[in-house]
Image (spheres, rainbow, N blue to C red):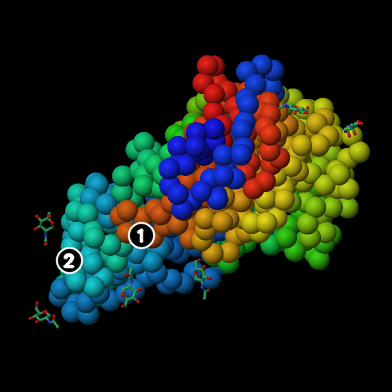
Amino acid sequence: MVALSTLSGIGALPLLLPLIHQAQGISLTVSTEGGNSSSPLLYGFIFEDINHPGDGGIYGEMLQNNGLQGTSPNLTAWRLDVSKNASGAVGFTNEGYWGIPVDGSEFQSSFWIKGDYSGNITIRLVSNYTGTEYGSATLTPSSNADNFTQNSVKFDTTKAPDGNVLYELTVDGGTAAGSSLYFGYLTLFGQTYKSRENGPNPQLANVLDSVQGSFLRFPGGNNLEGNSPTGRWKWNETIGPLEDRPGREGTWGYYNTDGLGLAEYFYWCEDLGLAPVLGVWDGFALDSGGGTPLTGDALTPYVDDVLKELGYILGSTSTTYGALRAASGQEEPWNLTMVEIGNEDHLGGGCNSYAERFTTFYDAIHAAYPELTLIASTSDTDCLPHNMPVGSWVDYHDYNNADGMVDQFDYFDNFNRSVPIFIGEYSRGTIGWPNMQGSVSEAVFMIGFERNSDLVKMAAYAPVLQLPDLIGLTQSPEMAFATTSYDVQQMFSTNRGDTIREVSSDSAFGPVYWVASSAGSRYQVN
Ligand SMILES: *[C@@H]1O[C@H](CO)[C@@H](O)[C@H](O)[C@H]1NC(C)=O
Ligand SMILES: *[C@@H]1O[C@H](CO)[C@@H](O)[C@H](O)[C@H]1NC(C)=O
Ligand SMILES: *[C@@H]1O[C@H](CO)[C@@H](O)[C@H](O)[C@H]1NC(C)=O
Ligand SMILES: *[C@@H]1O[C@H](CO)[C@@H](O)[C@H](O)[C@H]1NC(C)=O
Ligand SMILES: *[C@@H]1O[C@H](CO)[C@@H](O)[C@H](O)[C@H]1NC(C)=O
Ligand SMILES: *[C@@H]1O[C@H](CO)[C@@H](O)[C@H](O)[C@H]1NC(C)=O
Ligand SMILES: *[C@@H]1O[C@H](CO)[C@@H](O)[C@H](O)[C@H]1NC(C)=O
Ligand SMILES: *[C@@H]1O[C@H](CO)[C@@H](O)[C@H](O)[C@H]1NC(C)=O
Ligand SMILES: *[C@@H]1O[C@H](CO)[C@@H](O)[C@H](O)[C@H]1NC(C)=O
C-alpha cells in the first residue's frame, strides 16, 4: 500500500534509476467529488473445517477425539497404560492435535467417569520428550458404578517452550485394582478469547481480530454440503450439551467434533465483531448420487429444517426453537441478517436444478423472514432464475494462479449492477504457503473489486486458518504464523473508506494498480 505520488523520494539511489524513471512516470489525481459508496462489510472471512482450523485450531478444545465419537469409536490420539505398576499411577494420555499449546494461563479440564472408585485422579500436562510438567491437578472425583458423573478441575500452568506436550490422566492403581473404570467426554481448555465458555483459542482469535474483518461465512463451503444428503452439516446436531453432540464425518477427510457448533459460531461473530453469513443446505451434496440433487417435494423436509434452524437463531423465546435457544443459555436472538442458499451450486451437477432449488428455499425463507438478505451460491446466470428476486445477491468464487488473479482486475468494471455480489471465496490457489507473488496478485484483484465495492458487497479470503492457509499454526504456545496474504488482507481491511473516489492518471493500469477512497476528510490510495 503506497502513496504513489511520493515515490520520487527514492530517486537518490542511482542504481535504481531505470526502475524509478518508470515509477516516476505515473501521476494520480484523486477526485474529492462524486464517487460511489463502498460496502461497509467489504472484507471478511469464510470458515469451514478443512485442515483443522476448527478442531485443533481456533476452537479452544485441546484434546483430540475427546468424545470417542463416530460410528466406530477408536483410540485415535489416546494411549493407555502410562504405568503398568498397579500400585502406582495408572492411566492414559492424549496427545492433542499433534501437541497441546500450554501458554501459562489457567487451564480447565473435565471428564465423565463411571465406576466404583474412591481414590484420587491426577491430571498432568507433561513434555512428551523430557517429562517436564507444565501443570497438574489432583481431585477426588465423585464416581459411582451406576451412572456417569462429570468432574471438573482448574489449575495453573507454566508456559511450555513448544507444543510437544501430552495430557495425562492417572488414577491410583492400588485403589482401582480389580474394578472397572469408564471415562467419557474429556475436555481441556486454556484461557479462551474474551473468556467465552467453550470459546476460541485466544492466540488465533487475536490474530484474526487484527485483520478487523467485517463478517464470517460459515459453516462451509463443501463441509456444509457433506458427501451425501445424510452426511450434510446438521444444525440440530451441533447444539446443546457437548457430550450429547454426535459429531460428524466432515468432507475434508476427518471427523468433526461439532464442539464448535451453531451457537459457538454466533458467539465467535459476537466476540470478534463479525456479521454472520449462514450457509444452509439446499438439496445438493458433493456426491449427490453422481449429480442428481434433490428437487421438488423431496426438498420439503430440508426447507422445513432450515426454517427450524432460523427459528432457533431468530425466534422469540415464545416459539419452540427460540425457547430451545433460550434453554441453552441464549435469551436474545442472534443478529443474523444474511443467509446463503447452498454452496457452489454451479459445480458437480448442481447447476441445472439450482434455479428451482434456490427459488424453493428463497420463497420459504423470504416469506418467514422478509428482512433477511438471501444469497445465491453462484453468480453463473445459467444456473440462476432469469430474474433474481429484488434484494437477493449472488456469490462468485475465484481460486486462480497469480496471473489469473491479476487478469481479473477489471472483472467487475462492466458488470450488470442490478444484483449485488458476494465474493464468498477467493485466493491465489490453495496449494502451498501464500508467497509474495501470489499475495500481490490477490492485492491486485482486491483493488479491482474495491473499486467496484458499490456492487461487490463482501469478499472472503479462503481458506483462513492452518497450514497452508492464511494463518498457519502449530501447537506451540505462540501458534500462529501470519502469511504475506494475511498482511495483504490486514492492510486492505484496516485501510477502508466509505466512498470510492474517481482517480485520473496519465498511465493505464498494469503493472501498477490503485484504488482511492475516503472516509470523512481522510483520503487513501491503495
Ligand atoms: C511398583 O510399585 C512397588 C510398590 O510401590 C515398587 O516397589 C516398585 O518399584 C514399582 N515397580 C515399578 C516397575 O515401578
Ligand atoms: C488425594 O488428594 C488430596 C488433595 O490433593 C490429598 O490431600 C490426599 O492425600 C490424596 N489422597 C491420596 C490417597 O493420595
Ligand atoms: C443412576 O441414574 C438412574 C436414572 O437416571 C437413577 O434412577 C439412579 O438413581 C442413578 N443412580 C445413582 C447412584 O446416582
Ligand atoms: C510424542 O512422541 C512420540 C514418539 O517420539 C511421537 O510419535 C509423537 O508425535 C509425540 N507427540 C507429541 C504430541 O509430541
Ligand atoms: C436433526 O434433524 C434431522 C432432520 O433434519 C433429523 O433427521 C435428525 O434426527 C435430528 N437429529 C437429532 C439429534 O435430533
Ligand atoms: C477413529 O476415530 C476417528 C475419530 O472419530 C476417525 O476420524 C478415524 O477415521 C477413526 N479411525 C478408524 C480406523 O476407524
Ligand atoms: C446486526 O448486524 C447488522 C449487519 O451486520 C449491523 O448493521 C447491526 O449493527 C447489528 N446489530 C447489532 C445489535 O449488533
Ligand atoms: C441487468 O440484469 C437485469 C436482471 O437480470 C436485467 O433486467 C437488465 O436488463 C440487465 N441490464 C443490462 C444493462 O444488461
Ligand atoms: C461508480 O460506478 C459506476 C458504475 O455504476 C462506474 O462507471 C464509475 O466508474 C464508478 N465510480 C468510481 C469512482 O469508482
- For the point 30% across and 70% down, the residue is 92
Q: Nearer the viewer, residue 239 or 32?
A: 32
Nearer to us in this view, 439 or 246 = 439
Expressed as whole percent of the image width and height from the top left, the position of residue 304 reads: 74, 40
Nearest-to-viewer mark from 2 and 1? 1
Mark 1 residue type: Gln
Q: Specify whether residue 482 is in view.
A: yes
**Residue 31 appears left or right of 125:** right
Percent from the top left, x then y, of residue 522? Answer: 51, 21
For this orientation, the residue located farthest to the front is 14
Q: Nearer the viewer, residue 297 or 64?
A: 64
- Classify mark 2: residues with Cα within 10 Å, few (<14), some (14-19) or many (20+): few
Residue to which mark 1 is pinned:
475
Q: Secondary structure at mark 1?
A: loop
Alpha carbon separation for disc pair 2 and 1: 17 Å
Q: Amino acid at mark 2?
A: Thr
